Image (tube, rainbow, N blue to C red):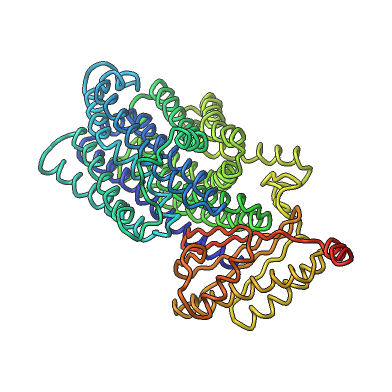
Amino acid sequence: MSMIRKLVRQMLAAQVLSALTVSLCLLIDNIMIARFLGEEAIAAYGLANPLLLVIGAIGSLLAAGVQVVCSKALGRGSQEEANAGFSSAVGVSAVVSLVFMALVLLLHPFLARVMGAGSGGTLFSQTKDYLAGFSLGAPGSIGALALVPFLQMAGQSNLLIAAVLTMTVTDVALDLLNVLVFHGGMFGMGMASAVSYYAAMGISCFYFLSKKSIFRFSLRQVSLKKIAELFRSGFPACFNMGATVLLVFMMNRMLESMEGSGAVAAFTVIMTIGNSACCITTGIGGVSLTMAGILYQEEDRTGLRNLLKLMCRCSVVLGLGMGIVMLAGAPVFASVFIPEAGRTKDLAILGLRLFAAGLIPCCLNSMLKYSYQAMGRVTLTEMISLAAGAVLPALAAWGFSRFLHTEGAWLFFAVGETLALVLIGLLVWKKTGEHPWRNGAALLLDRDFGARPDQMMELEIHTLPEAAEAAKRVERFCLEHGQDARVSNHIALCVEEMAGNTIEHGFARDGRENHLAVRIQHKDGQWTLRFRDDCSAFDPVHYMPEEGQQAVGIRLVMAMAEEAHYTYSLNLNNLALKLRGTPAEEEKAEVSNE
């Protein structure tokens, strides 16, 4: 549990920071637009936003598909399958993004009219110009999003942060050059974002082109079957973004008909600041998707329950903290975009404060939604995405605006997310008959999922004496579960040898606090041993030492195992060994026959 807790903290910090940096990039664009191009330009950006979200939806589809497909492959110990996912993701993202860019460049005047910008005038001109400039960055944006999960699985959080920081600095510099030197208007603002996405993708590529990369691109591994699997697995995330596109489009049209471009501008400010605040929900969802995928593939019921508890606590703490920041800072945030006092600014301040009330339920919904996606419950994920992302917020905005006018529409986020969480709780209670947050009921795991608690043993080992004591406990555990003495001794020896090698050669070399978690599971007559440590990468399956006690121990263990799978992901060594057990009764029968 301590290793999972440490890993979640590291991943969550990297995910939240990278999501925040990406949202800050859009935030800076909005500030520059507001300060230098005026209120109508903000409205133009808001009208263009649904199409910009489509680019994000495509990238999110690929990123989520990668997280599901490749985390399952790594959970099974198949590095080759993970490489096939990497190659296919890179290939399809290149083709799809280039096609999308070409279509937008060809149709951007028509698309501006569809978004509600009219057919002439400044609003129309600024909307179509921004669409054209931003779409030039579609390959960089989609490519960068598709590479993010691979950097996370490779444990390259620092490089990920460097990539998004590079993107932010590049965008700020180019925005300033556009408004102060080149005077490129909305097209220049879109181009600045486009170039910044290419900069981020370029930084990411340094790792994948290096010899240290655990993922290798091969054109031969690009397959239609794997691409279909990526799209099928990632579709719920695209569905989620599609729901957001629909919501923004509907809200823009409703607000424009109620109060004109001023309300649209206020809504754009609310969504821009809100998206930055939702970096916590993005981080929580991304961590849940990756970790739940690996643990689910390992059939680790205990690990999934612990992950649920941990992510629930993170959701409440982060949601509450960010909510307080939004409540207190709403006037300051609104003033950055709209300096002059007036109706538009007042609407923006109220909307930001009401948005803050929905952050905790949004975090919890994101955690559950992406956990369900990782566990293959695609339909449920899509239902939550559609309900929380579009249907319930739109109904809330429409219903409350009938009585409270534009101010009532700002309840869309808090009411929509809260109602979605209540509906999930009712669904869990109906299916399980249990409280959603008790005994991991919210995970909706099948009763026969994984091994029962009495069928497995979990250990954390830190020293060589602990390894020797653990081996004795493991041998007793095997004997108590009907295993014969010979195989029980073999399993205990596996644990002692692998734990001893890890502590002696891994812990000592790193010179820092390390963790080793061991799980022994007995199910359907087969024993599965899983070793997980946070030492330097070392593959005992393919790269055995040439000589020494370590070589003898590893060769002995590999000779005992019927199957051995190793992966290095999330900065963790993961080794899974499978041994076929022989019941003690069968051994006695064999002896009597002899």
Q: Quadrant of residue 161?
A: bottom left
Quadrant (top left/top right/bottom left/bottom right) for the C terminus: bottom right
Q: Where in the figure is residue 264, as x and y percent of width and height? A: 37, 30
Q: Residue furthest left?
A: 181
**Residue nearer the viewer, 82 or 156:** 82
Quadrant (top left/top right/bottom left/bottom right) for the N terminus: bottom right
Q: Residue at x 44, y 44 (%)?
A: 84
**Residue nearer the viewer, 414 or 287:** 287
Q: Residue furthest bottom?
A: 465
306 left or right, relative to 341:
right
Q: Quadrant of residue 463?
A: bottom right
Residue 313 sits above or below residue 533 on the image: above
Q: Where in the figure is residue 176, as x and y percent of width and height? A: 17, 46
Q: Residue at x 62, y 62 (%)?
A: 530
Residue 263 visible from this viewpoint: no
Q: Quadrant of residue 482?
A: bottom right
Q: Where in the figure is residue 566, as x and y percent of width and height? A: 52, 59
Q: Residue at x 56, y 47 (%)?
A: 367
Question: How many marks overall?
Answer: 0
Residue 409 visible from this viewpoint: yes
Q: Residue at x 43, y 48 (%)?
A: 83
26 left or right, relative to 416:
left
Q: Residue furthest front?
A: 594
Residue 354 sits above or below residue 259 on the image: below
286 left or right, relative to 257:
right
208 left or right, relative to 67:
left
Q: Where in the figure is residue 234, as x and y percent of width and height? A: 49, 37
**Residue nearer the viewer, 116 or 473:** 473
Q: Residue furthest right?
A: 592
